[in-house]
Image: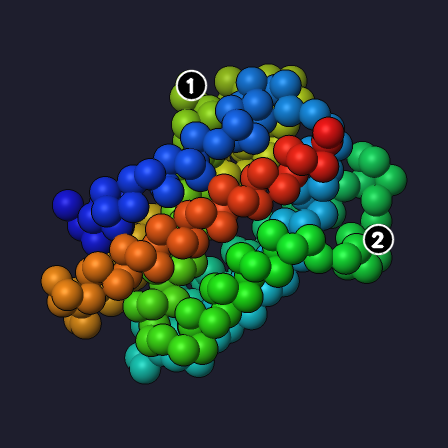
Amino acid sequence: MDIFDRLKQGAATEWHSYIDHAFVQQLGKGTLPEAAFRTYLVQDYLFLIQFARAWALAAYKSRTIADIRAAEASLSAILNETEMHVRLCRRWGICRADIESAPEHQATVAYSRFVLDCGAAGDLLDLYVALAPCVIGYAEIGRSLAPDGVEALGEHPYGEWIREYGGEAFQGVAVQMRRQLVDLAAKSMTERRLGELTELFGKASRLEASFWQMGLEASR
């Protein structure tokens, strides 16, 4: 098992509460209330602003050109990802200015600032572990929601979202991040540190689950 598999195994309860959350299940079935998805999209855009800052911090924390380039590629992918949010929000007459002026939900603040704090207080490996549930987790969710491939989604009400994360481009981003995580762990991880990283990974996964829950509760 590589470092990512070991982190998932060590924080299995938290991981499954995230990737198997009711929000994800309803989204996959197409039964997720529009209000839940709309709230999630706006808050996720606001989250991605902070997430982009975290990738910029990863570049700052890097000591090699290769690590800086890896952070740059992930930052670019995040900025492209925000454009999908804008496109989808236009369906409900929500423009970019409306999204950016929306107040951050408590779940958004908690998760985004947690990631930034991990980067500020820890090293590059700490930051990658905090970022991993979002990037690699979304790739796993995207694949699971399109078992027959994104081309088979047809007129699925949330097909564009699933195609974004289940598609080749984002899957490639996740593969590259996982390779980078494995490389960083090979350089600086010890068995003792694995426990600390697993705790960090588990907390990030719980915060991801809370983010889904925030969306569901908005539709009630």
177, above or below 205, in the image: below
Query: Residue at point 21% right, 53% down?
Result: 3
Q: As drawn, which residue projects farthest toward the right?
A: 93
* Residue that mark 2 sits on: 98
Question: In the rendered image, is residue 219 in sight?
Answer: yes
For label 1, the SS is: loop
Q: Amino acid at mark 2?
A: Asp
- Which numbered dot is residue 106? none
Residue 72: image x %, image y %? 47, 68
Structure colour scheme: rainbow
Residue occupying image coordinates x 72% and y 37%: 218
Q: Is residue 18 left or right of residue 202?
A: right
| Picture quarter with the C terminus | top right
Looking at the image, which residue is at 24% across and 67% down?
184
Q: Is residue 57 rendered to the left or right of residue 44?
A: left
Q: Which residue is mark 1?
A: 148
Amino acid beneath label 1: Asp
> Which corner quadrant of the image does residue 190 belong to?
bottom left
Viewer-closest of 118 and 158: 118
Q: Are marks 1 and 2 in contact (CB under 8 Å)?
A: no
3D distance between C-alphas at marks 1 and 2:
36 Å
The foreground one among 107 and 178 is: 107
Q: Position of residue 42 (x, y in %)?
A: 71, 47
Left or right: 154 in relation to 71? right
